Image (tube, grey):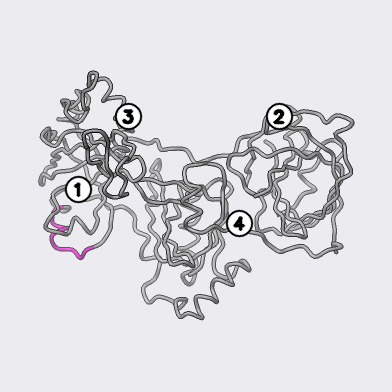
Amino acid sequence: MSLDMLLLDSKATLMAASVAASRVPTYGQQLTAGSMYSVAGFDVARCNPNFRLSDSSLLIRFNDTTSLSVLTEPSSPLPDECFRFRSDSEFFGLANSNTQLPDLVGEITAVKSTVSDTPGEKNHLMVTIKMDTGVSVTLSMFDAHAVSLHTRLESMSSDPRVIVATSLNPKIVGGRLFLNATSGTHIYFDKETNAGETFFYKLVATGTGLRSAAPLLKRHAKVEQVTIYELNEFVISAQTQDIDFICSGRVTGIKMDKGWCYVACSKCTKKLQRTASAFTCMHCDNPHAVGALRYRVEMGIADDTAEGVFVCFDGVMTKLHNLQANEAGHMLAGEGVNPEDTQVPAFILDMEGKTYTFQVRVTAYNFTANHQTFTITRILKERERAPLPGFVDNGANGDAGDDMPGANTAPANVEAGSSGERSALDTGAALPAKAPKRPSANASSKVGKKACIG
């Protein structure tokens, strides 16, 4: 596996650097996060445009002639840290593009964890973070990341108020913004970074940094398994809240009068209003919205205690049947036929009589008089989920080359050091790369800069 890092120079310019797998035995032992180096004789190539960890379009690659010297006192001061914070509007602009992996700083207002001790269970942790603009976003972590942060929070003597999270992949799901952790994500609390310390004292100065009387860790709740009777009673007697439960039951029938799909806005996923020549999204106030077919299936489910009406939306149905709603619609609807007017597909009707274990999301709406259904968010026998945006191994062919077609490399010299805050040395992250190209003689140049490995 290749070794990748971030370089930070005296002008706070952040740049990615990579050591090919075949050269890791040579340079791996010499590189330590938090140290400063003078680096000479490396190649410069263009970065892969996807999952970028820096704003620079260039990438430094170590070659056979690269030399390293540890610095104790650089000729110019090197920054201790460097982050690429973005505003909420910029996060929305980057969502679903897979181009940039920016950073976030904000106040922790809630933590919800479904970390379980049960082997094979999926672990998920969500952190609600209020940015300095007052807008709240959700940091989402899975598997090892979720377990690590959950354990860390449980072991802390007091609840943190400020979080700095790096290398996040913005996604919009169901009209909501989620910042998904990646393999290169680092988490820092309160005063562990200069940026976090500045934000912390800003909260204290405004009076919002005071410790809450209710411990944050109380929000870490494992999903409890209940009967359908207990679920029905809960929304009648409990206080209004958002919470998840696990239920098991047999499908007693599909509510065919409710249909099986709807045409949704491709932006917010709300149901579109159909006109003679176009679709209108009332939520987005768009009279010419682009529509996408999505599942919505209501069904009766019963166990030994009671029966309830549950609804499965697009994500759950697609994962369960491995078939998207638009694909099912094409199979059923003829030319010019509205899929919403077709009969319920056979594979949905076949769910009747089968027993499922599933996760139910209870929201404030379930405590109102208008409540008629519970929303199923996950069928537990379905173990798969969309993979985290990962970094591709550069391979072991000896050289990791250009990321962009036609890119040439150029040898360069650099004086470098490390901040230790944004280093990929201890994450195992690898930037995507293609096969190498060797630089031509006239491609060589005497390029010099001062940088900091971080």
| Residue picked out by circle 2 | 396
Disc with the residue nearer the chain's start (1 vs 2)? 1
User: Which element carries disc 2, helix, strand or loop?
Assistant: loop
Label whose residue precedes the other's in the sequence (3 or 2): 3
Q: Which residues are magenta?
A: 232-240
- Mark 4 Cα shell of 10 Å, populated few (<14), some (14-19), many (≥20): some
Q: Secondary structure at mark 4?
A: loop
Q: Which residue does the image show at 25% across and 33% down from the upper left? A: 277
Q: Secondary structure at mark 3?
A: loop
Residue at image location 61% in from the left, 44% down from the top: 52
Q: Is residue 419 left or right of residue 134?
A: right
Q: Amino acid at mark 4?
A: Arg
Can you tell which of label 2 and label 4 is closer to the viewer?
A: 4
Q: Residues within 10 Å of mark 2 (few under 14, many from 20)?
A: few
Residue 231 x %, y %: 17, 52
Q: CA distance from mark 4 to mark 3?
A: 36 Å
**Residue 247: which numbered mark, if any?**
none
Residue beneath the point at 47% across and 66% down:
133
Label 1: state its secondary structure. Answer: strand
Under mark 2, the amino acid is Ala
- Please name whichever residue, 5 or 106, is drawn nearer the observer in this view of the structure: 106
Mark seen at residue 374: 1
Q: Are marks 3 and 2 in contact (CB under 8 Å)?
A: no
Disc 1 marks a residue whose amino acid type is Phe
Of badges 3 and 1, the one in the foreground is: 3
Residue matched to label 3: 324
